[in-house]
Image (cartoon, rainbow, N blue to C red):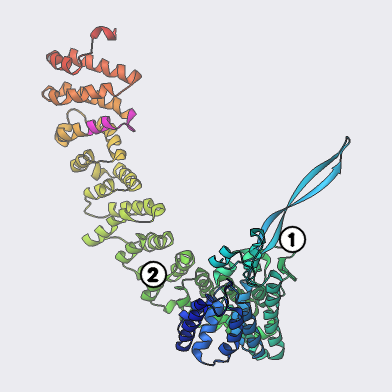
Amino acid sequence: MARGRNTPDFTLNWQIAGEQFAAGRASFVDTLRGIADPDRLGEFAREWYADHREDARILLHRYLSYPLNALRHEPLVKRLFKLAEAARDDATMAHFLVALDRTVRKTTKIKKRYTYENTRGWGREVKVIEEEVQVDVFGEMPKDEWIVRQYRNPRTNEPLQSRRQFDSANFRLFSGKTRNYLRRRAWRYFRTLGRLFPDKYVTAVCHALSLYTDEDTADGMGLLSNWGLVHILFHYSPALVSKPTGWVLAPGKTLRDLTAEPYHNALWKQQPDAALDLITSAKARTVRQWAMRWLAKESPQTLDQLPLDTLLDWLKAKDADLAEFAATRLRTKSGLESVSLDRWMSILDGAPADALDVVCDLIGRNVRGEQLSLFEAVRFAKMRAAPVAKLGIQWLKGKVPSSPPQIEAVLSLRDAQAQPLRPELCRWAATTLSAVNPFRPEWVMEFLDSRYEDVRTVGLEWLGTEQRAKDAPAVWQRMLESPYDNIRLPMVEKLDEITRAGADEDIYRPDLVRLLWATVLLNVHRGGRQKGLVVRQICDRVTRKPEESKHLLPILAVAVRSTRGIEFRTGLTAVVRLQDTKPELAGAIGKAFPELRREQLV
């Protein structure tokens, strides 16, 4: 049974839609889009447009903001379009211009072309040439399950003879040719408006421009898909060519060659404030960028007259292009010296991440380090954003901590979040703290205990150049307890340098030394070169301190067995030498090395 306007479901939907329309509810649009009754929809168009209530007009514009893909809504859309055109309703026509631009999207596809060439023998050779061409894509309406199940044409509701006749082209609101015609007709309305009513043109097209979004101009093909938008902004640009089916790039041109050459440019020059408003009100980045370029080219005096506060507020805009544009204008603006430090700080806190480079450069030109305390400079130096951290480094230069809280603030630079700049900040902190009197060796340990490897590396550099820290036993004892490889492994080598003639007995706790040796030996991924040093150091220790043999010989056994090749033989030789030097340890050595036979070394 064919579904018609008098079936119960449509009658019920119309009743619900009527109640929602009378109350001005936003849900009316969704209910209306679910009704596929072309005759009744066509009749309702005149009733809807004749309703002068503000709610009715808001609902109409809301309907046009949806994709034009509601099933069998052709009569409603066409009649509303003609009524708005006849009434010279600029606002509604602006919505139609945008809605119709969205009905056609351009894309590229590979087209194959075949050529035939005669060969010397029999037959001809076939060659395939692939070319990239632009094609139009027409969005389909959602497929109604009832229509699909009954094999009915969604445009006429007539039964189809076979599934083959169920063409997806039938699921479009208007054919491709009709869509292109309606787009041209919508633009013609505004083109004529500029000729007959020049005082209304700029205001009308600005209303349309404010409705486009970034989705409408997501890429180059998306931009060229908008027939009316390109006419308004780039009509006379030599980079474009207008064809009946849409815009294409001129031979040898790219989108980078687009220039701000709008239709009715003279009318735009009479109302530059309209373009100025688009900079902040337009939803599409393309429109905002066009307004900036057009003003810089055609009306620079308008930009020169912008108040300083307006440009400063633009620095905090979510749009990075606007913030960068404002920063460029502010570089030549007078009066920046009177901007308070708090105002600059609030701007920096609100600036978008993509514009931090230009905003920080502007702030760096106008804020001197003397204006900030050491705590404020450290706070910015520790931030994650690299441009902000660079500002902090710039402001820290020349500052010297003079109190315990300031020293603690400088030490906190070890936790800086900008990883590429963290080593530079730590080296500045090390140099600065080395000049503080009195110096405390524990400051070096703050770097050596850091969770960041690059900070620990700077700490080792600092330790190598700061004699006061090298002479402090507490520093070396804490290094023995470090859980980090890049601290433990160098410590094995340092033991050879700083332990002379039993000095380790006065500097280190024996249990910490044993812990260091054990952790180096248990490291299966690193420390291969240091393991040989551990064998020799343990043997020397046992020679000097036989009473520690019960603790050190098990470690020595592990050390020898964890080495390979020449280092293994060298370790066994050291064990044999230890047995010769300390015969009283022969029994203990035999238990630790049951497999050891002296004749194996011959």
**Mark 2 falls on what kind of element?**
helix
Residue 150 visible to the viewer: yes
Q: Is residue 519 magenta?
A: yes
Residue 203 visible to the viewer: no
The quarter in which the C terminus is drawn is top left
- Please rate how many residues cluster around mark 1, counting C-alpha atoms within 10 Å: few if below 14, some from 14 to 19, many from 20: few
Residue type at mark 1? Gly
Q: Mark 2 sits on what residue?
A: 349
- Please rate how many residues cluster around mark 2, counting C-alpha atoms within 10 Å: few if below 14, some from 14 to 19, many from 20: few
Mark 1 to mark 2 CA distance (whole Å): 44 Å
Q: Is residue 231 magenta?
A: no
Residue pictured at 59% horizontal, 71% vertical: 286
Q: In terms of sequence position, does the residue under pointer 1 or pointer 2 come before the other?
A: 1
Q: Which residues are magenta?
A: 516-528
* Position in image of residue 480 (x %, y %): 22, 38
Residue type at mark 2? Asp
